[in-house]
Amino acid sequence: MSKTVKLTYIFTYLLVLSTKLLAQSHFSVYVFDIKNNTAISNAAIVMESTGKGTYTDNNGYFELDNSSKNEIIVISKIGYETKRLHSSKIENTIYLTPKSNNLNETIIHGFSSSQLKKITPDQIYFSKKDIEKLPFILGEKDIIKLIQLTPGIQPASEGQSGLLVRGGNASMNLTLLDNVYLHNTAHLGGLFTAINSDFVHSLSFSKAGFDGQFGGRLSSITEINTLEKPKTTSFNGSIGLLAAKITGNIKINEKNSLLVSGRRSYLEVLKPLINDNESILGDTKNYFLYDFLTKYRYEFNAKSSFEAFTYITRDNFSDKTKVKSRKLVWGNLLIGANFRHNYSENLNSKTTVSNSYYEFEFSDNNFPFNYDAKNTFNNFSIKHTLSLKWNNKLLKFGGNFDINSTLPKRINASIDYTPIVVQNQVRFHFKETAIFGDLELPISNKTSLKTGLRIINYRLDNNVFVEKNNRIEYEPRLSLKYDLTSQNAFKLSYQRISQFMHQASIPGLSLPIDFFITSTKVIKPQISDQLSFGYTHEHNGFQLNSSIYYKKISNYTEFINGAANNLFNSDIFNDIAVGSLNSYGLEVSVKKKIKRFTSQTAFTLSRSIANFKVINEGKDFPATFDRPININTILRYQLNKRIEIGALFIYTSGQTYTRPKDVRIINEEPLLNFEQKNRSRYPSYHRLDLSCTYSFKPKKKWNSKLNLTLYNVYNQKNTFNIYHKIDGDLSQSYSFSEVREALFPFIPTLNWLFKF
């Protein structure tokens, strides 16, 4: 062999060797159970080409060297579905799914972001894994934000609370935390919601095809389950510029465990740095929030368990300027207990006893009015559900009994510093008793059926304002799914829902100022009939979900007048108009993952049209929360094993409002004269957020990340409130000016997230 050939051979060998060395990588990964978010120990990690591998330790952690970029990694554990992943798709945390051997487990625990397996359209399940894929918003990965980024659901404008689902208002959503009613789900401005995602195990959301066990709200059902009993004690939390939080899932012994979680904001820290008087961070404004949860769990034996929990949320906002002084305080207090028992492998039950209390207080001196208002709502509930499965069929049945009381408003007011005599409202008491049942079964190889019925009896106690009222409503539900192929499915659902609570909002104020009144003999319960048709396609990392819907709400309520003086009528029922709401729309979501890049876009085109005989001369007009266009996009890119980049863009049409036309002089006092109902619209809402997260190398039992989030990157002044000032005097002339307030400017924030 010549010298030249030898040199060429050596050079080629070294080149190949160096290429292999460059292709090699190192993995530091945790393996968790997707069902209860606990570490999986002794899971086998094997490189498919060589058979070499390792096992996870007690914390679910493993390290693996010398894995080619083209390697297939196999993760397996008895009792779990085996997972095969390409080495380029290995992330910091891998989730394994428990094997499902019966129908009940498939329905309750087998959900994922996939829609193909679900019979009902527009039903979504999110696990802890889905939460971790969220973009950061001011250092938070918020579970309610995850819902808002799906089609058909819109966040209320800045300063408002709740979700707007298919044209409905915030009162039409039922939110359950560990099966306990949560009245208000948002903190001020929508930056933070009332749910700290660190204590969330899973979330199920439906906007059609409701289970028979759920009722009383027309638009959506959100079930949030907190973390389950851990195998080992763990803590996680974060410290940032805007808020700090910590959650501990503590194993006391084999039968006892404790979940504790707390969060507190401190936006006032940023005020000296930003000092934007047009936003919530101005010198004259102050705001803070906190929430706290504690849950105790006890296992009697393998078949029975008990848990009791308390959850508290609180918001406090004040605004003191030269022309006004405004204050808002509101919060929830939840107390609940759940008892579960498995009679056999095929029959189990759950019993819940709970009390939920909500209180809101508001004061303002918006000329010429000076007032403070308060409203409360309390719900005591007992609920029992049985689940029976046999031969690929599932039957759920049970009942619930609720005792409710509401104080719609209690007002102290004056005009031009002259007291107004306002007869304070009394509390309204009403009871709801319901029985329900659901049956789910396959009717052919390609077709599945789910049908249900809820029968509810409503009883209102009499007081000085209303007579005793007793009525029964029947609520049928039906869903069908047809599998065209293994990758395509069509779905159809119909449901009728009754709601005995009515939300009356002050249209001119984009704040959580809502009065809740009960159904009477005159104001009948709101009835929603909804028909929804959906199509789902999934293939090779691509998901397409679409649906069209039509919803008609009878006995829909609004204030007759569009100004704050609605507050001062002695009988709130004199202010209420009863009409109808028609909502229809097209919803599309597209999701695609290409190696380390994931994109998700949701698009909604919809209309919500209201009609009242006594408003707008009986002509149709857009409802307060009519938002014709809603678009949002999430982008996520895993730059490497340590760095993740994210982006979120939101655009939605502004809500409608009633604008003054001119100023009129009545009894030598200037009063605003308003245009037709909801003829004007707030400016469109849009915002871009960017985030970058760096994951530090895990050290034994410690894992941490550093997140930088740029909220509202281009500093868009999104309107959260519009009010009108009257200028001039009798000697000259009067005019009015419109003042638009914004809450949140461009805000950079740095958060340190940790887990141990």
Image (cartoon, rainbow, N blue to C red):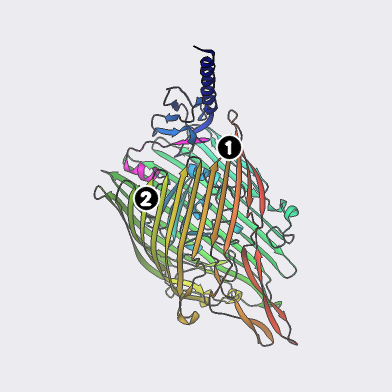
Callout 1: 10 Å neighbours few (<14), some, many (20+)?
Answer: some
Q: Give SS at disc 1.
A: strand
Q: Earlier in the sequence, mark 1 or mark 2?
A: 1
Please determine whether, in this image, residue 35 is positioned above or below residue 266.
above
Callout 2: 10 Å neighbours few (<14), some, many (20+)?
Answer: many
**Where does the image place residue 723, in percent across and percent down from the top left?**
64, 71
Q: Is residue 627 magenta?
A: no
Residue sticking out furthest to the top = 1
**Where does the image place residue 484, in percent across and percent down from the top left?**
29, 51
* Left or right: 554 in relation to 324: left
* Foreground pick, 602 / 155: 602
Q: Is residue 96 magenta?
A: yes
Q: Quickly name the residue at label 1.
A: 235
Choose top left, top right, bottom left or bottom right for residue 527: bottom left
CA distance separating discs 1 and 2: 39 Å
Numbered disc in front, either 1 or 2: 2
Please determine whether, in this image, residue 5 is positioned above or below residue 552.
above
Name the amino acid, label 1. Phe
Disc number placed over residue 537 in the picture, else none: 2
**Where does the image place residue 58, in percent across and percent down from the top left?**
51, 27
* Foreground pick, 449 / 301: 449
Give the extent of the magenta segment: 92-109
Name the amino acid, label 2. His
Contact between marks 1 and 2 (CB within 8 A): the answer is no
* Left or right: 369 in relation to 230: right
